[in-house]
Image: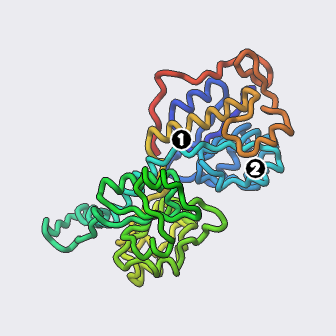
Amino acid sequence: MRPRIFITQPIADGAVARLRKVATVKVNPDASHIISKTALIAGVRRCDIVFSLLHDTIDREVLAANPKLRLVASQSITPDNIDVAEAIKRKIPITVVPPIVAEAAADLTFGLMLMAARRMVEADRLVHKGRFPGSQSNYLVGTAVYGKTIGLIGGGGRIGTRVARRAHGFGMRALYWSPRRKPESLEHEFAMTYVPLDQLLQESDFVSVHSPLKPETIHQIGARELALMKPSAYLINTARGAIVDAVALTRALKKRQIAGAGLDVFEHEPKVTPALLKMPNVVTTPHLGSAVGEVREQMANIVVDNILALLAGKVPPNCINPEVLRESSMAGGWRVTDGAVLDRDYRQPVSLARPRKGRAPARRS
């Protein structure tokens, strides 16, 4: 039989088509909800390879559901929600995608900043309710963005630097802090000024979080840091939810210690602190950093490249635990002949070539 692949949510049509040339593919059709644990386990039990997304929790129970699972092919940049130790124990390779979402995430960061500062979500809801305060009413007066100061925490990386580039178009002063100062050439290229973290918090009108999630960055922004911010300042987080202490943020907003927040990520997502959702000065989106059709299509096809490499008896280019492949058979029963993959019964070969033209457009989620 052909290899069986389970995809936890709809992805780009072109990527699915490539997989169907070499495998039997089942796609969970619901893009509006994270797949339930029960449905995920059921899908894993009936597949050789699971194609998972960032929000899917691939824990010990899921991995144990199928002792013959050959690969966890994740569309995530980091395996945050995968039990890597358990996968290694079971000799299951894990693949990810490279960090190609910087521009899309920077767009969203700036969008959240604008929406929070100019109270766009409040205004939209008001108009939908049939209310129109008037073009010069003070009812929805917000905060200017042009000419203000933006502080980028962990801002010397791919996304933070791109946010800085966008900020310059708004005449903004860009400060940044990271554990290690970046080379002067990078600071000059993106016109960013390095300052200590406390100074950044005290001087910025918008504080944007871009730190990677590590043990040492959990609650990097807590009660102390929020108290240092201006009462007129906004906190923007498009990095990882746990970097900001949700309880401390809720308290700071209730006490008007800061003016508002724009949040794409949450400490316990998909659960969101209920009090945050009741605040009109908090703009929220459901982790949309990479939610651009072109980016998602590219990401999905990279996952397909990883899967095809494994089926071809090669180490996938984005495998985070390649040692498990050296300790076991490369593709669990599949082998390659003349650039094509043969199924377990060694029947008709199917080309692994990636199509050059006519790729179907991405399916938006």
Q: Position of residue 137 (x, y in %)?
A: 15, 71
Looking at the image, do the residues carrying marks 1 and 2 touch, with CB atoms under 8 Å apart? no
Q: Is residue 288 visible?
A: no
Residue at the outermost bottom position:
255
Tell which circle, 1 or 2, labels the residue nearer the N-terminal end. 1
Q: Amino acid at mark 2?
A: Leu
Q: Nearer the viewer, residue 300 or 51?
A: 300
Q: Residue placed at 73% from the left, 15% from the top?
A: 338
Residue topped by disc 1: 10
Q: Residue placed at 46% from the left, 53% from the top?
A: 161
* In the displayed structure image, the side of residue 63 where residue 111 appears, left or right: left
| Depicted 138 relative to depicted 307: above or below | below
Query: In the picture, which quadrant includes the N terminus?
Result: top right
The picture quadrant where one finds residue 309 is top right
**For mark 2, does the 10 Å Cα neighbourhood hold few (<14), some (14 to 19), or many (20 or more) residues?**
many
Q: Nearer the viewer, residue 142 or 287?
A: 142
**For mark 1, does the 10 Å Cα neighbourhood hold few (<14), some (14 to 19), or many (20 or more) residues?**
some
Q: Residue placed at 54% from the left, 40% from the top?
A: 299
Q: Amino acid at mark 1?
A: Pro
The picture quadrant where one finds residue 361 is top left
Residue topped by disc 2: 63
Q: What is the CA distance from the residue labelled 1 to the residue labelled 2?
A: 21 Å
